[in-house]
């Protein structure tokens, strides 16, 4: 592994950009991953609660998990969101049949979510930690094309990935990789349809239903809040596969869609796996937890994706006398949307190799990236 791949260009343009900060109205702490819907794009705040938003913007919608949504007519540099209080004592006896909700959405997915060819400008971020030390980070701007905004299982099993999803790598803003504490890098040839499937919500719905449909699975859904239009439902699933899943969904009762989904797979009970790297080294891996998140918003009468993230934590690697705990994250923000055709992209990445080994297609556009303090300190390391 090389000590440093590349360090992007200077951030002077970001320093002059107008920013908006979203904080908790009760304790004034920054709210990371708050969504801001603008007239023609979507942005999310960084870990410090900041997002790039010009002062000329109007009609902003600001929301975050666990907080009451705010609609602003004009730009405000500081937005305070109030926590959405939940009286558990009043609602703990209200049960929800989550299996029925998931079955209905899976059956009618093409009616509820936009299912025609689409083209998105996206911000893609990946980070990797070794024993709690950040050693890899990349933030890039790209284009993402999807034929139907869904995962086609037939094409997936046949490895026709370009017929499902295409990505054009544009501006790699930051890319830094420093040698981790471990001298061992567990690169394998494993690439399955699941990797592409994780980009799509219908794939996750199907994966959840595999557990819910098992006769021995125990599951529960509890209504946390209901504002008349949208419900927040807490979910727990325990199957005989040794999988424990817990999470929360936001469900729009009128349109019968899940607008926000965050489930954590607790995989610590799985046995240790034996693996072999691409250069023939044997190692063992103990699975940890994996959290997958999707968010959607309604625009011009259709539901579009705004966020897809996958976070892994507490994965333990055993190699010779080394023991290393790994965690990583991958986040996609769908900044802008336009209808497309079935042709796809002219320049697209090769899924058979790391996305960062592909050659970027330079494209100038308004940036949607602001580093957090931790990320900036990592970039500044020599």
Image (cartoon, rainbow, N blue to C red):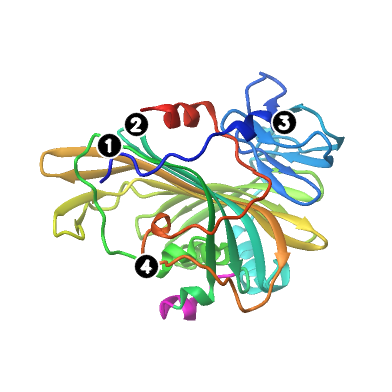
**Residue 159 vertical placement versus 349 (above, below):** below
Picture quadrant of residue 182:
top left
Question: Element under label 3?
Answer: strand
Q: Which residue is mark 4?
A: 352
Q: Please give the name of the residue rendered at 60% of the width and 31% of the height, measured from the top-left corner.
A: 12
Instruction: Identify which residue, 22 or 238, lies in the foreground.
Output: 22
Which of label 1 and label 2 is nearer to you?
A: 1
Q: CA distance from mark 1 to mark 2?
A: 8 Å
Q: CA distance from mark 2 to mark 4?
A: 28 Å
Label pair 1/2, CB-CB below 8 angstroms: yes
Q: Which residue is mark 2?
A: 133
| Number of residues whose C-alpha sits closer than 10 Å to that of mark 4, classed few (under 14), some (14–19) or many (20 or more) | few
Question: Element under label 4?
Answer: loop
Q: Which residue is mark 3?
A: 20
Q: Please give the name of the residue rendered at 42% of the width and 63% of the height, measured from the top-left corner.
A: 195
Picture quadrant of residue 119:
bottom right
Instruction: Identify which residue, 256 or 365, lies in the foreground.
Output: 365
The answer to whether one can see residue 129 in this image is: yes
Residue 144 rendering spot, x and y as whole percentages: 58, 62
Region in magenta: 150-159
Q: CA distance from mark 1 to mark 3?
A: 34 Å
Question: Element under label 1?
Answer: loop
């Amino acid at each position: 592994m090389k000590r440093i791949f590349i360090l992007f260009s200077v951030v002077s343009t970001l320093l002059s950009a107008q920013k908006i900060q979203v904080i908790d109205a009760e304790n004034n702490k920054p709210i990371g991953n708050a969504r801001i819907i603008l007239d023609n794009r979507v942005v999310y705040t960084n870990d410090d609660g900041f997002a790039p938003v010009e002062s000329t913007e109007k009609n902003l919608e600001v929301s975050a998990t666990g907080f009451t949504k705010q609609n602003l007519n004009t730009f405000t540099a500081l937005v305070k969101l109030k926590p959405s209080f939940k009286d558990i004592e009043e609602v703990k006896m209200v049960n929800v049949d989550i299996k029925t909700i998931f079955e209905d959405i899976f059956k009618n997915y093409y009616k509820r979510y936009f299912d025609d060819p689409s083209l998105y400008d996206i911000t893609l971020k990946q980070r990797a930690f070794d024993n709690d030390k950040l050693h890899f980070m990349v933030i890039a701007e790209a284009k993402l094309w999807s034929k139907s905004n869904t995962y086609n299982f037939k094409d997936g099993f046949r490895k026709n990935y370009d017929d499902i999803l295409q990505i054009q790598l544009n501006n790699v803003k930051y890319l830094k990789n420093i040698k981790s504490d471990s001298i061992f890098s567990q690169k394998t040839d494993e690439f399955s349809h699941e990797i592409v499937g994780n980009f799509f919500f219908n794939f996750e719905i199907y994966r959840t239903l595999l557990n819910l449909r098992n006769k021995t699975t125990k599951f529960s859904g509890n209504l946390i809040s209901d504002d008349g239009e949208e419900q927040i439902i807490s979910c727990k699933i325990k199957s005989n596969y040794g999988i424990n899943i817990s999470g929360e969904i936001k469900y729009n009762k009128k349109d019968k869609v899940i607008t926000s989904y965050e489930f954590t797979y607790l995989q610590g009970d799985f046995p240790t796996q034996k693996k072999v790297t691409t250069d023939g080294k044997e190692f063992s891996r103990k699975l940890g937890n994996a959290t997958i998140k999707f968010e959607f918003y309604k625009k011009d009468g259709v539901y579009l994706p705004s966020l897809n993230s996958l976070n892994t934590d507490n994965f333990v690697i055993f190699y010779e006398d080394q023991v290393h705990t790994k965690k990583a994250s991958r986040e996609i923000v769908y900044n802008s949307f336009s209808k497309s055709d079935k042709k796809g992209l002219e320049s697209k990445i090769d899924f058979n190799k790391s996305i960062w080994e592909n050659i970027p297609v330079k494209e100038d556009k308004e940036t949607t990236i602001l580093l957090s303090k931790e990320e900036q300190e990592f970039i500044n390391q020599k």
